[in-house]
Amino acid sequence: MRTFLPFVLWTLLCCPAARAEIFTSISQMTDLIYTEKELVQSLRDYIRAEESKLAAVKSWAHRLDDLTRVTTSDPEGYLAHPVNAYKLMKRLNTQWSELETLVLQNPSDGFISNMSVHRQYFPGDEDETGAAKALMRLQDTYQLDSEAFSRGKLPGLHHNALLSVDDCFDMGKTAYNDEDYYHAVLWMQQALKQLDGGEESVGSKADILDYLSYSVYQMGDLARAIELTRRLVAIAPTHQRAGGNLRYFEHLLLKQLNEQNQDYPPAPEEPIRLGTYRRPKDHLPEREAYEALCRGEGLQMNEARRSRLFCRYHDGRRNPRLLLKPMKEEDEWDSPHIVRYLEMLSHEETERIKELAKPKLARATVRDPKTGVLTTANYRVSKSAWLEEEDDPVIARVNQRIEDITGLELDTAELLQVANYGVGGQYEPHYDFSRRPFDSNLKRDGNRLATFLNYMSDVEAGGATVFPDFGAAIRPKKGTAVFWFNLFRSGEGDYRTRHAACPVLVGSKWVSNKWIHERGQEFRRPCGLTEVD
């Protein structure tokens, strides 16, 4: 049993998970909390069974120990008594067999069986990597240093969550394996800092310095790479790469100094921190503006614009269903016009919609701009489900309310899409309207004329809807909804409506949205006289 159990545990814990991308939905991750609680109880049951078995074996051993001291002191005298002879035969024929059966019992069977049942729902390597990258995304967007995460210093948090030296090392290794040396440096430096501070770790200081020194070299900081490699050589003189790397780095630095006619620089004294190195550019041209808006910076709201924003009661042009209880409408932005509706959804409605969506949640997809095929993407991290009116009366009721408020025809609209954002969940800047001719929906129902977005949860930190083109940020508020047109009256796309869902820093973000198409709106929103009416 001593060799069997670790092998089985290794098999269960190391095999790939059947389900992946759990990290993209907080809702599905909450189920794992209860799964883990059940497994802990199962583990305690196994420990009690092992302890009970061991106690029984010990009891046998004590009894037999006392008995053998007597029998071996005078074997012939002991066996001279016929009852003792009988009991010896019985012990060896029956009782020792019972003891053998007891020893062969495997109390781990129940625990292993329970593990096997739940294993199919466990996260896999993709989830662990995705969650690690999500922390780095939050780190970048909200300009948080590694220590903020390591020490759990995040806004709005009510639970302590600390990262160990080994956690930080694994974060750095994830970035390193992805050739993301910028984040590898930040997390390896944090691992080194905590290790130097006296924290214990499974990994070695030499491993941390090995990854850190090479990542610093990749960031172009030869002087610091040399200093770190010298520290590595000092504690691990036989390290297989350290000596060669040190000579190579020194050669490159001398060559660089000779070309620039400079003296050898002193070893850097300042520790590596957020801002020491510049984050490499990526595919998103408005990255800095987008992330600034997510942090609440760069907002273009001023007194002149605020004076043009109003709140009012909205009855949908005297719609009979809104006459007695009109909607509370607030202007969020003047041009393009974005409005928020208060009390759009009740608590009961939001919870029912979540309940309907949870079993259907699947990784949200985007349309590949080259092929037109729907696929997953790192810039959209959430899970979504599509709900029909036949699923529940609440869906029909919400759809009718959207039609009453907007005054638009919903027969050609898409189904109600429900989304739940996972760890660092986001949707980077994008257009809701299609700019590609191969979209088959365009031929039948026209383009996405308008977006109606329901917020179905409050978010403690992060998760705003931002518009980088004109510097607006709309904060989620449970039960409210925002609405805007994606197209001008001419049918041309309004490129100002490029927007994003900021990464969720703390909390779980639920939204539902209705994309309303052009067909059927000919008399409800007729064409204007110019291209930009």
Image (cartoon, rainbow, N blue to C red):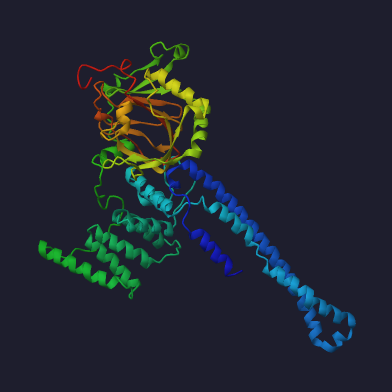
Drawn side of residue 345 relative to residue 484, left or right? right
Q: Residue at x 80, y 76 (%)?
A: 91
Location of residue 208 (image quadrant)? bottom left
* Quadrant assignment for the N terminus: bottom right
Q: Quadrant of the C terminus?
A: top left
Location of residue 113 by image quarter:
bottom right
Q: Nearer the viewer, residue 250 or 436?
A: 436
Q: Residue at position x 21%, y 63% from top?
A: 266
Left or right, 360 with reference to 238: right
Figure check: 469 above or below 146: above
Left or right of residue 37: residue 250: left
Q: Total number of numbered labels? A: 0
> Closest to the observer: 298 or 391?
391
Above or below: residue 236 compared with residue 137:
below
Measured from the top left, where is residue 418 in percent x and y?
44, 34
Residue 434 shows in the view: yes
Q: Position of residue 142 (x, y in %)?
A: 34, 42
Asked whether residue 158 appears in the rendered view, the answer is: no
Q: Nearer the viewer, residue 170 or 268?
A: 170
Q: Position of residue 306 (x, y in %)?
A: 30, 22
- Relative to 399, residue 77 above or below: below
Residue 341: image x %, image y %?
Answer: 40, 22
Residue 115 lies in quadrant = bottom right
